[in-house]
Amino acid sequence: MTQRRSWIPYALVLPALLYLAVFFVYPLVEAFMLSFRGDEGGFTLEFFRQMAADTYFRSAVRNSFLLTLLVVPLQLVIALIIALIVNTRFRLASSFLYICAIPLGISDLAAGLIWLSVFTERGYLNTILGGLRLTAQPITFLTPERIDWLYGAIVVTEVWRATAIVMVILVAGLQLVPRDYLEAADVFGARPLQKLWRITLPLLMPSLQAALMIRTILALQLFATVITLSGRLVPVLAGESYFWYSTYRNFNVASAYAVLIMVISFLITFMYLRLLRTRAEALA
Amino acid sequence: MIATQAPHPSGASGVRRARPLLWIGAAAIAAWVLAPIVLIGLAAFTPREALYSWPRPIIPSQVSLDTFLFFFNSHGVLRSTLNSLLVAGLTIVLALALGAPAGYSLARFVFPGRDGLRLSILATKMFPATILAVPLTVAFIRWHLYDTLLGVALVHTVLALPFTIIITSSIFVGVPTELEEAALTLGCSRAGAFRRVVLPMALPGLAASAIFTFVLSWNEVFAATILTLDNRTLPALIMNAIGSAGAPLDYRFAGGFFMIVPAVVIIFLIRRYLMTMWGVTVR
């Protein structure tokens, strides 16, 4: 409905905008102030220096990136499989979709606790291994001596918890793929895999890109899952922000971490938009 | 959405050969999603000694409420549950009061700056609690909002607002303009037309948006942990019990189970709207 120039639409949007200005823009500015302004009010890099000099810093950066690299591709593949299964519209498709969507309602904290009950020393994994007579004694999986196992536990938990959001994006995207194209391919005798590679996936590209971007940025927020499973054995960026705030009561360094997460998120988004656009054009 | 489209015979032919594979895959994935939820449920009702014994059967030989009651009677659990519910309620009210008008505006009017507005609202989704919470603490201490339920609700509203605006906007798009115009020509004011025509039709969708906000607020850990000290929400309480107090395993399992129950029930209740809500929010 086209309206004459009127103040009504602006008036309706104004409260939300004012709210976001106070509780969203202001804290973003404050984050920079806290992390860049010294005691005398001048510009300083002291807090970033403090952050970088901390023993946990390097491994936090490395872990955040490594875990993202491990988790996000797995999530994309599994979510794509789920979405393709849902899209076949087999008899139980809607129940299947519901089951796969359950983790949408589960927090990172609860997911961490759920998988703790599996991976802890007297947990279900050891129970199963013991029951199958594969191990005589319970194995300690979550130990500083086996960082690779800790990684495995975190990756499993994150894939279990956050694949659902990717799945929803892809299911929504698949519904936009015109059925006529697939039917035309049938007419020309295309095999199912050919249809997937030549038609479905290229047309699904925008959804895949959106999912990739959102999941990568969210993966940098990784926090409660890691703490429930590893404490501080596998430090990550958001976790360090939390520890600097809650344990050391240092707002400045905690903010410096927040700014770092923000900058990395920005760079990744920018990179994705750049890379994926050219790729999409090359495909077309 | 899925059920409404007619089956296509030609589309099914290619699939039929892969049928057994499809069922096996679907069953495996469903089991992968469901099994951990069943297991934490079992853990929450396993007697405490059995949780630490070895060998330990998967299905507890005796079911007991001990573990669960131990958690529920732990200091602060009942209160923080109430706190969580209060914060979620406040967040729902705030997010709808601020977001629904904006959503209506984006759905109904074409005005200069609309696309930019839509984009910037979408962009706010990229700055989650992790970035906002610490700097907000400083401001909240100044404004006497630190360690208050209102303070937590205000932050959760920031997180929920972009979703609320986008969901409500898609809902209002679905309400036919003709009906609204008819009400206007029949002598209703704009506000009257909204109240008598648009609102009743949009109500189920607005309820779905409120439920989405509930799940978001009930599950939010980072900001709630950072912004509270005594007035913890449930996730903040449990996070703190784990992070600094070293809570025992039975507390953790029962707490984990207790936190997921409402969310699972709610997702079941709104399963028909799943795609509309989460699907729309990402575009």
Image (cartoon, rainbow, N blue to C red):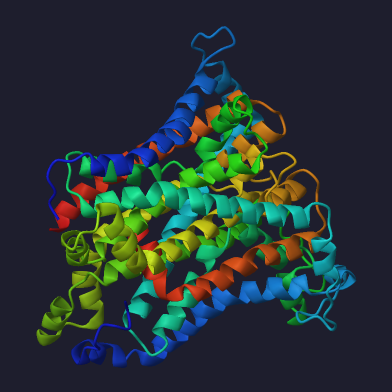
Q: Is residue A35 left or right of residue A217?
A: right
Q: Residue at x 58, y 61 (%)?
A: A157
Seen in the picture, residue B205 relative to A269 is either above or below; the reply is below
Can residue A168 be seen in the rendering of this structure?
Answer: no
Q: Residue at x 20, y 39 (%)?
A: B113
Q: Residue at x 72, y 77 (%)?
A: A128
Nearer to us in this view, A26 or A94? A26
Please identify the quarter of the rendering in which residue A130 is found: bottom right
Residue farthest to the right, as pictured: B49
Seen in the picture, residue B160 relative to A88 is either above or below; the reply is above
Count of marks, rendered view:
0
Residue farthest to the front, as pictured: B187
Seen in the picture, residue B253 relative to A88 is either above or below; the reply is above
x%, y% of residue A94?
41, 81
Please identify the quarter of the rendering in which residue B215 is found: bottom right
Nearer to us in this view, A174 or B211? B211
x%, y% of residue A6?
18, 41
Q: Is residue A246 left or right of residue A277?
A: right
| The N terminus of chain B: image quadrant | bottom left
x%, y% of residue B41?
70, 74
x%, y% of residue A79?
41, 68
Q: Is residue A146 left or right of residue A98?
A: right
